[in-house]
Amino acid sequence: MVEIEIDGKKVEVQEGCMVMHAAEEAGTYIPHFCYHKKLSIAANCRMCLVEVEKAPKPMPACATPVTQGMIVRTKSDKAIKAQKSVMEFLLINHPLDCPICDQGGECQLQDLAVGYGGSKSRYEEEKRVVFHKDVGPLISMEEMSRCIHCTRCVRFGQEIAGVMELGMSNRGEHSEIETFVGQSVDSELRKKGVNLKGQRKNNGMETRKKYTKTHIIPKG
């Protein structure tokens, strides 16, 4: 066991666990999208950046292992500024269609945007558009411009369903979630992973006929 300090509160956790796990033990909430306790660590949304004493820059809580005597601040000016900057980047290309979105009012991105988003956008260029993909009758990918690339759906397919049907191609703002070589999604279990997305159905993917069973893996 190692002892660390999170926002002035000392907590003992298992050696080798991540700051995110320690924060959960301490009852401290750290905003996140890609992290899920039942899935592998991706650390690609960067929403969970926190200040770690003696670290030169904010560190992702989900991928930073604890060390003896570590001091973590999740609500310092440095941490909040980093989290707000990440939120601004996530919203740059996100469509402004919350009032007509199926998941409006039940969206994790929407909830965190209230606390960490700006009152207005500095981005004046055109937002990117991701074209519709036909991946079969089980999953609809008609609104993938809403996807924030948390890759929960990809990891769920590989680690829980045991099928590699989805993946992320390209890099940066050109990244897209799609099937390998244009194949369809045929796994009945695979479609359950849609509900694990950082925004749940608001990611642009929906299961056909509303076949959603979030009890398979609890919300992270």
Image (cartoon, rainbow, N blue to C red):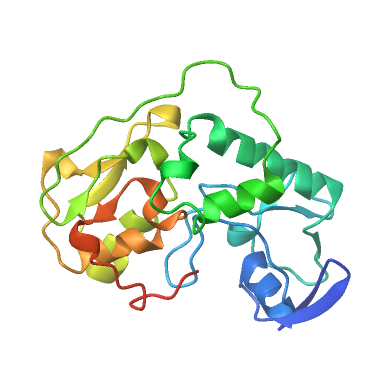
Q: Quadrant of residue 61?
A: bottom right
Q: Nearer the viewer, residue 131 or 4?
A: 131
Q: Quadrant of residue 189?
A: bottom left
Extreme residue toward the front, this view: 99
Left/right placement of residue 42 relative to residue 16 reads: left
Q: Residue at x 77, y 42 (%)?
A: 81
Q: Can you say which quadrant of the picture contains the N terminus?
A: bottom right
Q: Is residue 21 above or below residue 95?
A: below
Residue 124 spot, x, y in % from top left: 58, 16
Residue 148 in view: no
Q: Nearer the viewer, residue 97 or 76?
A: 97
Residue 17 spot, x, y in % from top left: 61, 72
Q: Nearer the viewer, residue 21 or 202?
A: 202
Q: Residue at x 36, y 26 (%)?
A: 129
Q: Is residue 131 above or below residue 44?
A: above
Residue 15 in view: yes
Residue 190 spot, x, y in % from top left: 22, 63
